[in-house]
């Protein structure tokens, strides 16, 4: 269950360390960040002055019957509101700028790390989890940046400011209010714990609901073919009901907490009124002060509730950060070593493996002591059963992995001494399934050379004999390849992959042949294009068909990670019984 | 229909659905509304009591008049708490119950919709109906009771304020439309931007997904920088959308504090002057300030409600449309039963075309004798898969009829028909459950023994036993932990375990390599023995196994007979086969 492993909470051990590490990603945002706190403080303080102005208006104006004082207080209030508006607007805006700029940086940094990691890392990791680092994890930071940060900052400042204001206005009433707030905090802690548990469950169960739903939709044909509609619906009903129950658990928590908060607020109001009234009557408090106090009181409770909500956002933001940093701590295995150089031109493209052994996991060798050479311009087919290790050879030649023992070299240069850039200019892999990126056909063909001219692209298509096919597409080179999930057949995707390789003009081609049959319409075209691509180039073909082996200059047969036979197709057919077996099976399939 | 009209239509249909839902849960909904009204009346009472306290204090008549009022305030607070609790709990209950029930309805409905519907409806679309559209609808349902109470509250408060002091009351009540308008406008703007933002986040996630799944190609061509640039560009568009939203927040959010504060200013000046003139008591003045503070949150929520209503109504109307679409394949009114037989299949002048006009069958007449096997051969697009899909009634024929042992397939109950006609699809779909459960989809009652023997026949037993958990191994989402060939073998076992009268293999071994296919072909002989079997295939080794081959071109049956005969007599047959099997390199 892929989606589960990314939903689980990460332990946040040292929030302080996390935050300071987070800061180091964008040191240039430090001063804007400090400025943001400044302007937010200004907005909050100006807002807090309001009730004091009212107090002045009441005590100097209303109580004394001085109309001028009332108007003066009104004018001051309006002036403060204007300042407050702009300060608050700037604060909102600048928090967003800092937060969103930070996220742009973070996305870039994490992704660039992802790109530098080796194929070994990719084969060890679930792709869903990798994608979730860049999506759901960063999105939970986004949520915090766009909403949480402003809420946290303004509410925190408001709570502190109001507390100070309350205490300054009248410490006796303030003490009573703080007592009630103490109870509120205790209640909030209990609620948060309960709500967190409930929402964790809600999140987990919505995941299941969506997964079951998706399965019910994508598998609907099988469901109907085997008349499983009823059992599917009852499975879904159960999962759905559990989600409902989790939601109701959260609803129950909310349904006791908020009434209690409302009651506490009224209790604080009554307490302040009781104490205040007594003091006004014995003359130790003005009525204006009491009114100002009541106004502050209204601003005290909501921010506390808000803060407890923000706490949740903050928690998930921190756990997302922890996961992201774990990713950036992954070691980069395949990289340019110091002193790495480019292949000296011209590249002949002679491939050799010398005493190469390899294992993905220590203790389970996949290849043992492979020594083989592919001469310049030679075509070698590698054959063997599934799991024999023949695909691994292709990956080693591409330097997706470094051999555990031995060396892989081209023109006598150990691949580990060569820059990645030069390696990728020299070698091209054509995977089993022609992979297309979202975008136009042109972008996909000119993938290795974005600046390639239309003319260059058409030349390639003409040379490979597939220009007519492209012209027959509705938008020619501008055809979007991915609209509505792959309108191209597997054969057509293969054609694009071949054209892509041809345009990049590599000295060595590694071709992992598709196991399944291509659609007959394009099969012949693929064959023709391939002939053009491979002509005059060194190529290593992981072969699954008889004809590929027949056409190779040499065949290397792998069994259980070792080379068991080597020679031309005819030689092997004569010498190697295992090869004969394989050929027989192939022949049965295509006769 | 103009866009405006269709929107209005959406609104009507959507609100009608929302209303139907509320009515069908009326008892819970009523409790929530009662709670909301209790809450509302107490919210309105408290500022009045506070004003009374202040008046008593200002009159200097001592604390004896204050204590009972404080008692009343706390009582009001307690009553209010009960109201909130009811309002929230039952409000949640209505909305979550309705959401869950509707989601079940949608799921069941989707399961019943025919292939033709699923051919043109994307998974994402259906997912959206049952997830985001439903939550949109739920939000509005949950907010309906409180909004109702809020609307009553605005009226009550306005009346109270006007009774206390008409001039000041009307001045202060101006805040209601001002704040309603502002919050509604804000919400509708943010809705647009957040939609945008979601869209762009999805685009970014596509870049990440394709980079991860195409990492071999990226690394092969050393195009890390290009992918990085794609991502950075997307991140920049997210920044723009987020900032667009942030700008709206910056403009509007401070207003939610400024507008009530302006109300307070009005109370301070107008009210203050009127207190000095003796037209207003001091307590009433304080009550005014309290009322204003009370109204802020309800006003914001109400503005939000009406800003979101059109979206929710549109979502509701989309759900309504889905549920109102009838399945194209329906059960017969007076079903017949299959007669005992060996599974003779007859196509009588069958014509068929897909809604998009593709892959047509024209006047196909075909008899597959019971218990025999037939291979279907034709170029891509010739209609050979369609033949397979018509027998179990995934689609209905446009003209003509198909019979099994003499009974028209449309006369049979779907479950009876499909329990005797099993299809193994080319795209082998596995559920994310154990391998065993996946095979048992074919026959939920099958014994372990039968599951295993089916797996053996499909040449799946050996690799299944190679897994640490054997048959209990859970395959990933869509069977992603298995290879294509392994998936096909598991779904083949699924078809075998069903033990149907008629077995259809729709190119079911295209992903296994030649070695394994050779093994499966051995096993197929056993499976086909005495069973009507339809195989869509183009490998000659498979065609050599079947009794007859039907050769289809352009939607017509061109030839019918044993493979070797067709090979000799029909040159075009050999040509098509050669094109199909022509190997690469």
Image (spheres, coloured by chain):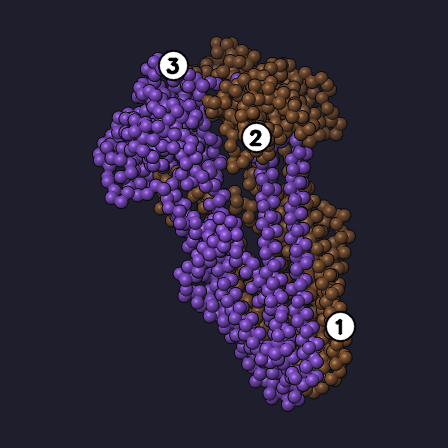
Chain colours: A brown, B purple
Q: Give the image location of residue B47, x and y in percent.
A: 59, 77
Identify the residue at horizontal 64%, vertical 46% (top origin).
Answer: B238
Between marks 2 and 3, how big is the CA–CA gap?
A: 37 Å
Left or right of B316 in this view: B419? left
- Circles 2, 1 touching at the beta carbon (< 8 Å): no
Q: Is residue B573 above or below residue B482?
A: above
Please identify the residue farthest to the bottom as the structure is shown: B61
Q: Nearer the viewer, residue B483 or A54?
A: A54
**Label disc, if present, on residue A75 of the rendered structure:** 1
Tag nearer the camera, 2 or 1: 2
- How far, Cα to Cα, is label 2 from label 1? 67 Å
Disc number lying in front (2 or 3): 2
Does the rendering let one see residue A269? Answer: no
The residue singled out by tag 2 in the image is A475
* Marks 1 and 3 on same chain: no
Determine crowd level at label 1: few under 14, some 14-19, many 20+ residues with C-alpha closer than 10 A.
some
Q: CA distance from mark 1 to mark 3?
A: 100 Å
Give the residue at x 57% y 42%: A129
Contact (Cβ within 8 Å) of mark 2 with mark 3: no
Q: Which residue is mark 3?
A: B571
User: What is the x, y in percent for residue A396?
Assistant: 61, 25
- Observer-side mark, 1 or 3, equals 1
Tell which subunit mark 2 falls on: A
């Amino acid at each position: 269950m892929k989606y589960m492993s990314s939903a689980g909470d990460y332990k946040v051990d040292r929030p302080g360390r996390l935050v300071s590490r987070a800061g180091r990603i964008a040191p240039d945002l430090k001063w804007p960040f400090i400025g943001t706190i400044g302007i937010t403080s200004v907005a909050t303080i100006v807002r807090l002055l309001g009730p004091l102005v009212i107090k002045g208006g009441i005590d100097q104006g209303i109580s004394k019957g001085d109309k001028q004082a009332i108007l003066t207080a009104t004018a001051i209030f309006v002036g403060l509101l204007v300042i407050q508006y702009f300060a608050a607007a700037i604060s909102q805006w600048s928090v967003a700028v800092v937060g969103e700029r930070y996220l742009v940086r973070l996305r870039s940094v994490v992704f660039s790390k992802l790109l530098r990691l080796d194929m070994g890392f990719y084969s060890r990791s679930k792709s869903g989890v990798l994608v979730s680092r860049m999506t759901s994890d960063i999105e939970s930071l986004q949520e915090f940046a766009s909403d949480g940060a402003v809420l946290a900052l303004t509410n925190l400042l408001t709570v502190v400011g109001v507390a100070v204001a309350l205490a300054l206005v009248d410490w006796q009433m303030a003490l009573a209010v703080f007592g009630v707030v103490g109870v509120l905090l205790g209640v909030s802690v209990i609620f948060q714990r309960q709500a967190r548990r409930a929402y964790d469950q809600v999140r987990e169960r919505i995941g299941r609901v969506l997964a079951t739903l998706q399965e019910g939709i994508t598998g609907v044909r099988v469901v109907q073919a085997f008349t499983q509609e009823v059992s599917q619906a009852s499975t879904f009903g159960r999962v759905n009901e559990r989600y409902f129950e989790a939601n109701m658990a959260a609803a129950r928590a909310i349904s006791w907490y908020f009434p209690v908060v409302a009651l506490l607020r009224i209790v604080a109001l009554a307490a302040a009124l009781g104490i205040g009234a007594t003091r006004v009557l014995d003359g130790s408090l003005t009525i204006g002060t009491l009114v100002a106090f009541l106004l502050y009181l209204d601003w005290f409770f909501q921010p506390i509730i808000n803060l407890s909500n923000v706490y949740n956002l903050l928690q998930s933001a921190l756990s997302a950060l922890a996961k992201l940093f774990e990713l950036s701590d992954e070691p980069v295995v395949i990289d340019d070593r110091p002193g790495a150089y480019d292949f000296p031109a011209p590249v002949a493209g002679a491939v050799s493996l010398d005493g190469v052994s390899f294992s993905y996991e220590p203790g389970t060798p996949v290849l043992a002591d492979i020594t083989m050479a592919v001469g310049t311009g030679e075509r070698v087919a590698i054959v063997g059963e599934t799991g024999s290790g023949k695909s691994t050879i292709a990956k080693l030649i591409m330097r997706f992995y470094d051999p555990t023992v031995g060396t892989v070299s081209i023109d006598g240069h150990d691949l580990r001494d060569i820059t990645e850039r030069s390696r990728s200019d020299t070698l091209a892999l054509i995977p089993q399934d022609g992979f297309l990126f979202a975008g136009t056909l042109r972008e996909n063909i000119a993938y290795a050379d974005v600046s390639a001219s239309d003319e260059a692209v058409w030349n390639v298509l003409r040379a490979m004999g597939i220009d007519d096919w492209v012209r027959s597409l509705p938008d020619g080179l501008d055809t979007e390849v991915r609209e509505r999930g792959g309108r191209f057949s597997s054969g057509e995707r293969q054609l694009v992959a071949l054209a892509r390789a041809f345009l990049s003009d590599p000295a060595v081609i590694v071709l992992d042949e598709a196991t399944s049959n291509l659609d007959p319409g394009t099969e012949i075209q693929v064959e023709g294009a391939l002939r053009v691509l491979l002509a005059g180039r060194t190529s290593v073909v992981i072969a699954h068909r008889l004809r590929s082996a027949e056409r190779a200059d040499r065949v290397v047969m792998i069994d259980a990670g070792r080379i068991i036979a080597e020679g031309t197709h005819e030689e092997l057919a004569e010498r190697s019984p295992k090869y004969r077996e394989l050929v027989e099976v192939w022949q049965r399939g295509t006769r | 229909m103009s866009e405006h009209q269709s929107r209005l239509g959406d609104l009507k249909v959507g609100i009608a659905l929302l209303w139907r839902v509320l009515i069908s849960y009326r008892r819970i909904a009523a409790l929530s509304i009662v709670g909301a009204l209790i809450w509302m009346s107490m919210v309105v009472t408290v500022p009045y009591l506070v004003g009374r306290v202040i008046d008593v204090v200002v009159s200097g008549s001592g604390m004896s008049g204050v204590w009972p009022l404080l008692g009343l305030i706390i009582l009001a607070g307690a009553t209010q708490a009960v109201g909130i609790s009811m309002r929230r709990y039952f409000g949640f209950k209505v909305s979550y119950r309705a959401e869950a029930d509707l989601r079940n309805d949608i799921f069941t409905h989707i399961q019943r919709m025919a292939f033709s519907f699923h051919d043109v409806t994307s998974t994402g679309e259906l997912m959206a109906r049952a997830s985001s559209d439903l939550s949109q609808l739920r939000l509005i349902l949950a907010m309906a009771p409180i909004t109702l109470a809020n609307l009553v509250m605005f009226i009550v408060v306005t009346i109270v304020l006007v009774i206390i002091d008409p001039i000041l009351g009307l001045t202060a009540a101006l805040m209601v439309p001002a704040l309603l308008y502002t919050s509604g406008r804000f919400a509708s703007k943010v809705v647009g931007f957040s939609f945008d933002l979601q869209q762009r986040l999805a685009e970014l996630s596509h870049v990440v997904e394709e980079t991860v799944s195409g990492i071999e190609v990226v690394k092969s061509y050393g195009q890390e920088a290009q992918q990085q640039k794609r991502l950075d560009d997307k991140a920049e568009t997210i920044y723009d959308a987020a900032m667009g939203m942030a700008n709206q927040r910056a403009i509007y959010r401070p207003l939610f504090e400024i507008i009530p504060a302006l109300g307070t200013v009005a109370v301070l000046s107008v009210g203050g002057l009127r207190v000095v003139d003796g037209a207003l008591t001091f307590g009433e003045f304080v009550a005014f300030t309290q009322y204003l503070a009370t109204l802020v949150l309800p006003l914001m929520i109400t503005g939000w409600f009406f800003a979101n209503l059109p979206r929710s109504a549109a979502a509701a109307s989309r759900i309504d449309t889905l549920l109102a679409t009838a399945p194209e394949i329906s059960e017969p009114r007076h079903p017949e039963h299959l007669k005992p037989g060996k599974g003779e299949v007859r196509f009588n002048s069958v014509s068929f075309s897909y809604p998009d006009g593709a892959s047509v069958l024209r006047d196909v007449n075909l008899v597959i004798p019971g218990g025999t096997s037939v291979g279907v051969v034709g170029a891509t697009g010739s209609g050979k898969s369609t033949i397979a899909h018509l027998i179990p009634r995934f689609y209905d024929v446009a003209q003509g009829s198909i019979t099994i042992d003499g009974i028209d397939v449309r006369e049979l109950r779907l479950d009876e028909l499909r329990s005797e006609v099993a299809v193994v699809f080319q795209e082998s779909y596995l559920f994310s459950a154990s391998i065993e459960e996946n095979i048992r989809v074919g026959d939920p009652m099958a014994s372990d023994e039968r599951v295993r023997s089916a797996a053996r026949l499909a040449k799946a037993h050996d690799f299944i036993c190679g897994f640490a958990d054997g048959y209990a191994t859970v395959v990933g989402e869509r069977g992603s932990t298995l290879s294509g060939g392994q998936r096909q073998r598991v779904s083949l076992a699924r078809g075998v375990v069903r033990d149907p009268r008629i077995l259809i293999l729709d190119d079911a071994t295209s992903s296994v390599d030649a070695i394994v296919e050779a093994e499966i072909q051995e096993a197929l002989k056993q499976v086909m023995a005495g069973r009507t079997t339809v195989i869509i295939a183009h490998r000659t080794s498979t065609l050599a196994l079947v009794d007859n081959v039907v050769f289809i071109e352009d939607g017509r049956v061109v030839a019918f007979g044993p493979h070797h005969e067709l090979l000799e007599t029909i040159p075009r047959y050999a040509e098509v086969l050669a094109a199909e099997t022509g190997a690469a390199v």
